Image (cartoon, grey):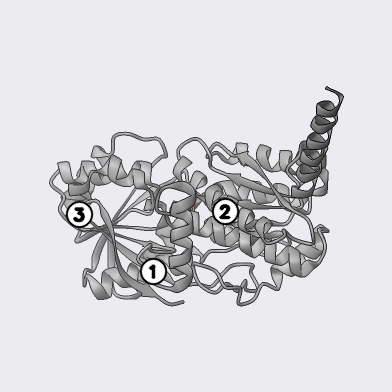
Amino acid sequence: MKQSRLMAAVVLSIFLFTLILSGCGGGSASKDIKIGLLNEMTGGNATFGTSSANGAKMAIKEANAKGGVLGKQIQAVIADNKSEPSESVNAMTKLVTQDKVVAVTGIFASSNAIAASSVAEASKMPFLAVGATNPKVTVDEKSGKVKDYTFRVCFIDPFQGTVGANFVLSTLKLKQAAVLIDSSSDYSKGLAAFFKEAFTKGGGSILAEESYLQKDQDFKTILTKVKALNPQVIYVPGYYEEVGKIVKQARELGITAPIIGGDGWDSPKLVEIGTAPALNNTYFTNHYSVDDTSAASKTFVEAYKKEYGQAPDALAVLGYDAANVLIDAIKRANSTEAAKIREALAATKDIAAVTGSTTLNASHDAVKSAVIIEMKDGKQMYKATVKP
Ligand code: PHE
C-alpha cells in the first residue's frame, strides 16, 4: 500500500515536471513567451480569422517542437475582434493589459487593423498585421508618418488595385467598368480608388460608381442602375458575404459581364453564397494560390491538411507566414522587449515564407507578388502571378 502511494507520488511528480518542461502547465505559463493572435474569429469575416489563427498556431507548434524561441516555449493567446473595429480595440487592449503578450499578430480586415493599431501604437506593442492591405494600416492618415509599432506581411492595395486594373485592360481587353463600393470598409473604399486610378490611367473609363454597406442583403437597386449603363466589366472590391450576394443577384438580373474583385473574395463561403454557376466569369486578385508548386508551399499544404483535415486558403498561409516572421524577429531581437522586437521587425529581410520571400520596406509593408484567380464551376483556378 505504502509502496503504491509512493509510486503514485513519483509518477505525479514526473508528470508535473514534464508539464513544466514542456511549458504547457498552468503554473509555468509565465515562463512562456506569449504572443497574441488577434483575429476575426466570429462575425461577418469569421472564415478569415479562423484560417489565420490556424496558420499561426501551426507555426507556433512547429517552432515549439524545435525548442521554441530564446530558449522558451511560445504560448498563443487567442483574441477575437468579432469582425468589428471597436472590438478590435477591446481585444488589443486586453492582450496588452491583461495577457501581457510580447507581440501581436493577426487581423485581415483593414478597418479592424487600423483600429487595433491605434492601441498598439499608444501602448508600444509590436503588431504584425496579416492580411490588412489598406495603406492607412501602417501609415498614419493625419501625419502621413509611418507608424512605429505596426507592420504587415502582405502587399498593399495601390499594388492590388493596379494588378486588377491591368488584368482587365490587358488580359480581358475591356475598357468600360462600373465599380461597387462597400462604403463601411476602408479596404473597399481604398481598393476601389486605386483600381479607378490605374484603370483610367491605362485608358479605361468608369461608367458608374455605386455604394452599399456591410450586412446589406438586397443589391438589386444598384445592380439595376448598373445594368442600364451596360458596362463591359464590374469591379467589386468587397468581402465574400456581400460579394456572393452581389454576384448572384447580378446574374439573376441578366448581367453576364465579368465581375472582378480582390483578396476579400477568398473564402470557401463565397461559392456557398454566390453559387458556382453565377461565379463563372469572375476573377479576383489574391496573395496565394494552393496551386503554387514551390517546395515550401507543398510542404506547408501537406502539413496543414494533416493538422486540420482541409486544404489551407490564402489566409491560413498568411497567418502561418506572419507568425514565422514574428518568431524570427523575436529571435533576432534576442529579447522580448517591445522596442527591440520593433527594431527586428523593421529589419525583416529575405525571410523564406510560403507566400514568397518576405522583406519589410520603409513603410513596414511587404513587397510581394499577387496572383490572379478565376472562379470556374465553383473552383478557384490559378491564372497568373504578377510581380511587384
Ligand atoms: N485585404 C483585406 C483587407 O484589408 C482583407 C483580406 C486579406 C481578405 C486577405 C482576404 C484575404 O481588409
Please state if 70 lies on the left or on the right of 194 as rendered. Answer: right
The kind of residue on which mark 1 rests is Asp
Mark 3 and mark 1 lie on one chain; the one further toward the N terminus is: 3
**Cβ atoms under marks 2 and 1 closer than 8 Å:** no
Q: Position of residue 44 (x, y in %)?
A: 45, 38
Query: Considering only order in the chain, which callout, 3 or 2, is on the residue closer to the N terminus?
Result: 2
Cβ of mark 2 under 8 Å from ligand 1: the answer is no
Looking at the image, which residue sits at the far top?
Answer: 1
Residue at image coords 20%, 53%: 377
- Which label sits in the foreground, 2 or 3? 2
Q: Is residue 232 left or right of residue 74?
A: left
Which of 55 and 243 lies nearest the eye of the viewer? Answer: 55
Distance in Å between CA atoms under marks 2 and 1: 19 Å
Reading the image, the residue beneath label 3 is: 280
Q: Secondary structure at mark 1?
A: loop
Q: Dot 2 lies on which element?
A: helix
Q: For mark 1, does the 10 Å Cα neighbourhood hold few (<14), some (14 to 19), or many (20 or more) residues?
A: some
Q: Nearer the viewer, residue 330 or 26?
A: 26
Q: Which mark is residue 292?
A: 1
User: Which residue is found at the position 42% from the left and 47% from the top?
Assistant: 309
Q: Seen in the image, is 379 located left or right of residue 117?
A: left
Q: Residue at x 44, y 60 (%)?
A: 301
Give residue 58's mark.
2
Circle 2 residues within 10 Å: few <14, some 14–19, many ≥20: many
Q: Is residue 45 visible?
A: no
The amino acid on which the numbered mark 2 sits, given as a three-letter code, is Met
C-alpha gap between disc 2 and disc 3? 34 Å
Quadrant including the N terminus: top right
Q: CA distance from mark 3 to mark 1?
A: 22 Å
- Compared to residue 357, the image places residue 339 above or below, namely above
